Image: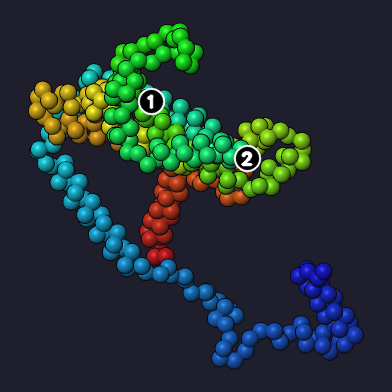
Amino acid sequence: MTTVSDVSDSGVSGSGHSGSGHSGSGHSGSGDSGAPRGPHASPASAPGTEPPPIVPRRRVGRRLSAAAALLVFAMVLASVVRNDAFQWGLVGRYFTTSAVLDGLLLTLWLTGVVMVLGFLFGTLLAVMRLSANPVLRTLSWGYVWIFRSTPLLVQLLFWFNIGALYPTLGLGIPYGPQLFTVTTVNLLGPTLTAVIGLTLHETAYAAEVVRGGILSVDPGQTEAAQALGLSRRRTLYRIVVPQAMRSIVPTAGNMLIGTLKGTSIVSVLAVHDLLYSVQLVYNQNYQVIPLLMVATLWYVAVTTVLGAGQYYVERHYARGSSRGLPPTPLGLLRVRVAGLRGRLNSVTAPDGR
C-alpha cells in the first residue's frame, strides 16, 4: 500500500535524477521559479512584511445575553439579601441549633441507609431481570412495575397503616403452630416505616439504573470472559459491573440527591428529620419563613457536597475509557484564570496587541 511518505520520497528522488541529467533544469530549479509572481502574490512573500493579526469574531449577541442574565441575577440576589422579611439574623441564630442538627443527622442517616439497601436489592432485581429464567424475569418486572406506578407518599402511608391489614406478624409452620408472634404496631415505628417505604421505592428505580448500566457494556466483553473460562458470576462482578459503573454513577448520583430531598416527605409520619425539626420550631415561635430558609440552606449545602463527590467518582470511573478525563473544578479555575491573565497582558502590552 502506498503511503504519503512513499510518494514524497519518490518525488524527491525523481527531481534529483532529473537535475543530474539536465543541468539546465537543475539551474532553473534553483531560482525563483516556484515563487508566486504578479498582482496575486502572497503578502508573506514580500520581504519585511508580517502576516495580518487574527482577530476573533465579535459575538455581540452572546455578550448582550450574558449581561442581561447577570443583571437579572443581581436584581434577584439584591431583593433576597435586602428583604427584611427573610430575617437573616434569625436564620443565622437557628442554623446550628441542636434541634436542627439532630434533624439533619437523621436525614443523612436515612439517605445513606436507603441508598445502600436500595442499590443492594436493586442489583439483585436487575440480575433477575436479565436472567434466562422466565419466572425471575416476570417477578422482577412486576416489582418494578408496581412500585414505580405508586406515589411515594401513598406507599409510606400504606406501610404506616399496615397494622390495619396485619395486626400481628408471626413465624411458624404454614397452617400450623406459630413459633412467635409480634404486634405490628409495636414492631413498625415511624422511623422503621420510613426506612422500609423509601427502600422499597428506591429499589425499583435502582434496578432499572443497574440494568441499563449492564446493558451498556459491549457484549464482546462477556464473550471474551467466557472464552477465558470465567464463570458467569465472576464475569458479572469482575468484568461487567466495573465497566457499567460509568453509566450507573451519574444516574445514581442524581438518585442520591433526590433521595436526600425526598426524605422530607417522611415528616408526614412524624419522623424527626430536618424538615420536621424546623416545623416543630416554627410551630412554637411562628417564624415560618426564617426556619424554612434554615432547612433550605442545609439542603443546598449538603447537595453541593454530594454533587462535588459525584463529580470525582465519575472522574474515577472514567479512567481507561477512550475519552479524556474531565478537568477538576480547581484545574478548570486555573485554566480560566490563566486565560484571563493572558488577555489582560495582551491588552496592556506596549504594542497594543
Question: In the rendered view of the protein, which quadrant contains the N terminus?
Answer: bottom right
Secondary structure at numbered mark 1: helix
**Residue that appears at 32% across and 68% down:** 60
Image coordinates of residue 14 in percent, x first then y, are 85, 79
Instruction: Give the amino acid type for the residue marked by disc 2 in the picture.
Output: Ala
188 or 336: nearer the viewer = 188
Q: Residue furthest front?
A: 175
Give residue 236's quadrant in the image: top right
Vertical placement of residue 264 versus 82, above or below: above
Image coordinates of residue 238 in percent, x first then y, are 65, 34
238 or 174: nearer the viewer = 174
Vertical placement of residue 97 versus 120, above or below: above
Quick one: label 2, few (<14), some, or many (20+) residues within 10 Å?
few
Res. 21 in view: yes
Total residue callouts: 2
Instruction: Give the amino acid type for the residue marked by disc 1 in the picture.
Output: Ile
**Residue that appears at 42% across and 65% down:** 353
For marks 1 and 2, give the CA distance. Answer: 29 Å
**Residue that appears at 55% across and 81% down:** 43
Secondary structure at numbered mark 2: loop
**Mark earlier in primary sequence (1, 2):** 2
**Residue that appears at 60% across and 80% down:** 45
Q: Which mark is residue 132?
A: 2
Mark 1 lies on residue: 196
